[in-house]
Image: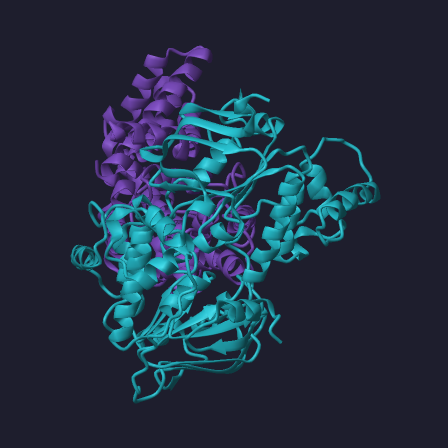
Amino acid sequence: MSDRIVSIIRALIFIVLALALCGVIFSIAGYSATGMFQAIIDGAFFRNNALTHALRWGMPLFITAVGVAISFRAGYFNIGAQGQFYMGAICAAFAADWLNGLPAAIVIPVCFLAGTTGGALWSLWPGLLRLKSGADEVITTLMGNFLAGLLLVYVTSGPLKDPSGSGQQASSTPLDAAYRISTSAGLSPVIIAIAALVGISMWLLVNRTAYGVLSGLAGRNATMVNWQGAKLVNIGLASFIISGALAGLAGTVELLGPNGRLASGFLPAHGFTAILIALVANLSITGIAIVAFFFGGLASAALYLPVIAGLPATAIEIINASIALFITAKSGVIDRLVRWRKGR
Amino acid sequence: MVDGDTIVLQCRDISVHYGDVVALSDLSVAFDRGKIHAVVGQNGAGKTTFARAVAGLVSAQNGQILIDGKAIPPGNVSGARQAGVELVHQSFALPPSFSVAETMQFGAQNRAVYSRKGLEKRWQKHLDALDVKVSAGQRIRDLPVETQQSVEIARALVTKARVLILDEPTAVLSPEGTAKLFERVRRLQEIGVTVILILHKIREVLAIADTVTVLRGGLLVEGPIDTSGIDAARLSELIIGPDLRVVDEDDRAALTGSAAVAHTTAMKEAADGPPVLDVRSLSTRVDPDGPALDTVDLTIAAGEIVGVAGVEGNGQRTLVRAISALADVSAGTIELDGVTMTDAAMKARRLAGLRVIPFERNVEGLSLSSTLWQNWSIRMLLERSILAFIQPAELRKRCNDALDIWDVRYDNVSQLAGSLSGGNAQKVILAREMDDQARLIIAAQPTRGLDIGATSFVWDSLRKAKHRGCGILFISSDLDEIMDVCDRVVVMLSGRIVEAFEPPYDLKKIGAAMTGLSK
């Protein structure tokens, strides 16, 4: 069996086991497990426009998850995607505010530049701390998430506050429609093109450049790559920067696309879902495309469940948490199972 | 006294498998009480597995181990301990931050509360009685290797050990250290301990042991044989086996340590042009991996193999790291092929023909969880720009060709490096580092842990590279190997090169230089 098939089987086993656990939890909580799954599958993939919704949520998740995979491959557990996503959105929002009134052909590219740079910088400082002084990136990027979240609260209730806001949730002034790259429905050719561009370029980077092979080797055995004379610092910094830039890009897409404005605490689980996607896909770019679509479906079902089916949206969070639970068992039971199958 | 009473340790049909690998198969052997027994064999013969099975560290799949006629439960360390079996490991297992006294207490009865002074007093007596010259209050990490080993032996004798197994105790010792260890072993014999020494060299077997048992490929070849009734040549045949007749006589002697080989075939062609390596007054700052270098001078001509002998941890690693642009040079110069490279990056040095076979094959040499083609191609990839376009299919094909030339046994180049045996894994590194553009090849412990076939393959490869005109820096802690392979030998001690030797070599003199006794 090729490694690719093994990792696909492994991902499927994760999801099946996680769903089985969810079934048990749903039953204990007093819901019919089959009914609950029926509603989730309907909500995710079979109701009207379900595929459009799955793609709307899946695209930004895909972009962020690819970034997560880039840093995880190189051996750096940058779990700050959420904060880098926020910083991207914040920087893009400032750029849009600053250039308000200029033609869209100028404003939109500048916003993207600002957003990706913001995300990259928010990933660069933990990267520098890690590579220059050995500070654990798990801690620093996690702190970065909190800082970015608080900054978002400040920005939306301070500098960029919408004066006409209802006061229920602090948010910025809505963007001029000319600067939007999609309607609130959230799917447009521009967004699809961006996701495709990210997918293709990152696939090439990982699979067709020296960086791809070297960063993978460094992630699995940095000592060996160091003895070979590679500049680990450069490979590491590149990985941090790319992963932050992509999260920032996803933040910009959300801002200029479906959201249209900055809201305090928007999409609070985006970065963590992206980590989950990257891990389920075993850090493969193609795999991430498929898994992101699946999680996009779940995300859209989360909105559908309470409104249409009268069920709790937290069901989706339970599914996500269960999948996370089984991913941590990755190197244990499931690997052994796969090996046992291989052995026969 | 009944007849069987002379036997202290008996193994009946022990078999140990690790997954698909058979480490020991149906081993039946009995050792007499109060003697010094040697167990020998090449790497992979099953010596360590035998020791671990007797000490209860691995569980034999079948068979029985009896101490004084009583079967001990398989795979149970405390059971083996109670029966009186103690094992001193090949790589010491003492906690570095503990004091000697704490280490001893650790292996003894558990008492929750103790005072440091009380402990030191109590164990100092024990250490003195065994003539281990160490203060019980010292920390393990501050002790030289030889003392650590004595402490480990003393620790093993805390309980009433009747059978003491030492797993390759001489591997880390200089010849002097080995002589001292053997004295200690004889004294243990006098107080009635049966000692089983796992050894590697025939010379040592004949110097110390009463009997010798030969293992090969997990099977008992012969033994225990009285050492008075066997000579080095016969023993070397038993160890190597029938399949390696091709290996030349000097190599055989070096492989089994049966005689100090007087290597006289120094072949120095008048090399025109600059030396491939010219290191002058090189000093480094303290390296995380070893002591700093102190004004090291070293020159290697084209077509010359220069050996670095020395007890491990005397700066060999720092030397390799300095030449590979990893250590922090504070003074002096490094020239490769006549070009000053003191501050050059590894990329420039590689392009000048520097190749490194690192010390730790599985950590520094290979990424075991990466594919063969990735491991093989990293050197080439690092010679280009990091964003250079690559075609994996083509790299895989080239890797395939290269590994075939080096006779690596593998299924396909996309399998993980960790799935190869030690010898094959080392060949992957050779395939990467010994290409036609190589000028200076650093071979650091290139044969460690390899069986005889793989070891002589590595030696032959290095000799071929030398005849092609490469300069080779050969680092090993095995003097027999160094003397057989090298055209010139330098000895490192505490980060300095203290003495240089030309053939014919004198094992004793080199050994004395290693411990600093010659001056």
- Identify the residue shown where x is 32% and y is 66%: B382
Q: Position of residue A190 (x, y in %)?
A: 25, 50
- Which residue is the extreme one toward the bottom? B272
| Left or right placement of residue B402 versus residue A235 in this view | left
Q: Which of the 4 quarters of the picture holds residue A21?
A: top left
Residue A54 in sight: yes
- Identify the residue shown where x is 49% and y is 37%: B51
Q: Where B494 sits versus B107, above or below?
A: below
What letter labels the chain drawn in purple?
A
Q: Position of residue A159 (x, y in %)?
A: 54, 54
Q: Where B432 sits versus A332, above or below?
A: below
Q: Nearer the viewer, residue B447 or A151?
A: B447
Q: Nearer the viewer, residue B379 or A330?
A: B379
| Left or right placement of residue A10 versus residue A115 in this view | left
What letter labels the chain drawn in cyan?
B
- Identify the residue shown where x is 53% and y is 29%: B7
| Left or right placement of residue B340 versus residue B470 in this view | right
Q: Nearer the viewer, residue B111 or B86?
A: B86
Q: Position of residue B440 (x, y in %)?
A: 34, 74
Rendered-image quadrant of the C terminus of chain A:
top left
Rendered-image quadrant of the N terminus of chain A:
top left
Residue A96 in sight: no
